Amino acid sequence: MAGIFKAYDIRGVYGKDVTEEVFGKIARAYAKFTGVRKVVVARDCRPHSDPLFEAFAKGLTESGADVIDIGHASTPMSYFANGSLGADGSVMITASHNTKEWNGCKLCRGGAVPISGATGIADIERMVMSDDFGPAATAKGSVSKVDVLPAYAAHVRSFARLARPLHIACDFANGMGICESKSFDGTALTFDSLYGEFDGSFPNHEANPLKTETLRDLQALVRANPGKYAFGAAFDGDADRVGFVDEKGDIIPMDFITALVARDMLASTPGAACFYDLRSSRVVEETIAECGGRPMMSRVGHSFIKDQMRQNDAVFAGELSGHYYFKANYTAESSSMAVFALANIVSASNRPLSELIAPLRKYVQSGEINTRVAGDPASVLSRIKAEFEGKADRVFELDGVSVDKWESEGWWCNVRSSNTEPLVRLNLEAKTADVMAERRDALLAMIRA
């Protein structure tokens, strides 16, 4: 059971590590740790999400907290409900993109502020493992049902500024992106859907747009209908992430989407801060600056990004994993807002999306390369830092070790370790293919030495 408590959420195999009994304990620990009195609780469409909801709600009400049940919902909807209903916290029961055997939950304080391993999950784990929940509540809480989908859809819809009608293709992977699509109703954005029926067994493919193989059906649909779709969107299981293909069915790198969405956001909020994760192409920083925004780099992980956004009053942030964060959604993800932002830009142009993306393909990226190391990953990072400190334009440790030699030699890299495995991850970008290959091979040799 201890292994289910992760850096950003709680997740494990249902019936083995994640059970109704465990969820009841987590609920009581969450209530004690946060002191919540009114909690939004939502769930995805996995068959076991319903009994887990009942167990969590029981644990909360027995702790004296009132439960606002918003039913089956996307994770962005749960964040919206948390903020708009003035709740003290929210719980989203989901295992995101994991396969049908898995389940878990994402925990927040009021205002959709996430609880991570460093800000509470470890404390909740200790309470659960020691059965330390304090005295029983003198009065039980209640459960009330609220349908937030109409309000959420209307909220997202208000960000649509389409200059002309667009038709797109959506792969919902039988998950909660179906809820997000209600935001498109009544707008100039229409869509055809793949796998648009709720089925938490995910019978067609894994609901994870970060894996390129899961985009094949969407690519095939777009390519089979040339000229029909402005672009395609693929949602993950709980719809807090979305991936895109252009009108030709070609996959668009998620950092390029960050650049385009930032462009749309800055059109209405000039001068605002926009964050990008440190693995993103240099072109993202350049695009934000060209659009009059303040480009700001963040470390990887939603809790870090959201905290940095709040500290700097940022309007938007994008992560290489397909998370797109909006100040307007309580500084949390909204996949449908990202779709609208992209649609706004495409509809205002007389060029297709592939041509809007083309100027962003300026540099050469290695992609994320993982190396399993025998020793301590921290020692690898120390070796990289020692090698380049004093020799690079700058070396910094926002997340792992970043080496910037962009001005002097035309390349930069980030080397960081995994939170859960003995892996070291390398991301490198250069101005030319030759420099990228040369530096990639040299860095990998150092990592694997």
Image (cartoon, helix red, strand yellow):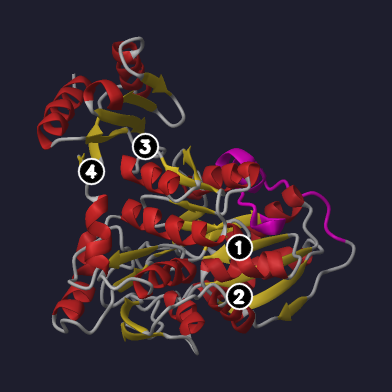
Which numbered disc, 4 or 3, marks the residue that appears first in the sequence? 4
Q: Is residue 245 above or below residue 317?
A: below
Q: Residues within 10 Å of mark 4 (few under 14, many from 20)?
A: few
Residue 26's spot in the image, x, y percent? 63, 55
Which of labels 3 and 1 is toward the front?
Answer: 1
Are the residues flagged by discs 2 and 1 in contact, CB closer than 8 Å? yes
Which numbered disc, 2 or 4, marks the residue that appears first in the sequence? 2
Query: What residue type is disc 4 on?
Result: Gly
Residue 47 seen in the figure: yes
Q: Residues within 10 Å of mark 2 (few under 14, many from 20)?
A: some
State the CA–CA distance, disc 4 to disc 3: 16 Å
Q: Is residue 304 above or below residue 223?
A: above
Tag 3 secondary structure = loop
Where does label 2 land, which residue?
Answer: 155
Tag 4 secondary structure = loop
Query: What residue type is disc 3 on?
Result: Ser
State the CA–CA distance, disc 2 to disc 1: 9 Å
Tag 1 secondary structure = helix
Where does label 3 land, which residue?
Answer: 418
State the CA–CA distance, disc 4 to disc 1: 31 Å
**Does residue 398 appear to the left or right of 249 in the view shown?**
right
What's drawn in magenta, residue-wise?
Answer: 109-137
Where does label 4 land, which residue?
Answer: 367
| 130 falls in the magenta region | yes
State the CA–CA distance, disc 3 to disc 2: 36 Å
Along the viewing direction, whichever of 278 and 163 lies nearer the viewer: 163
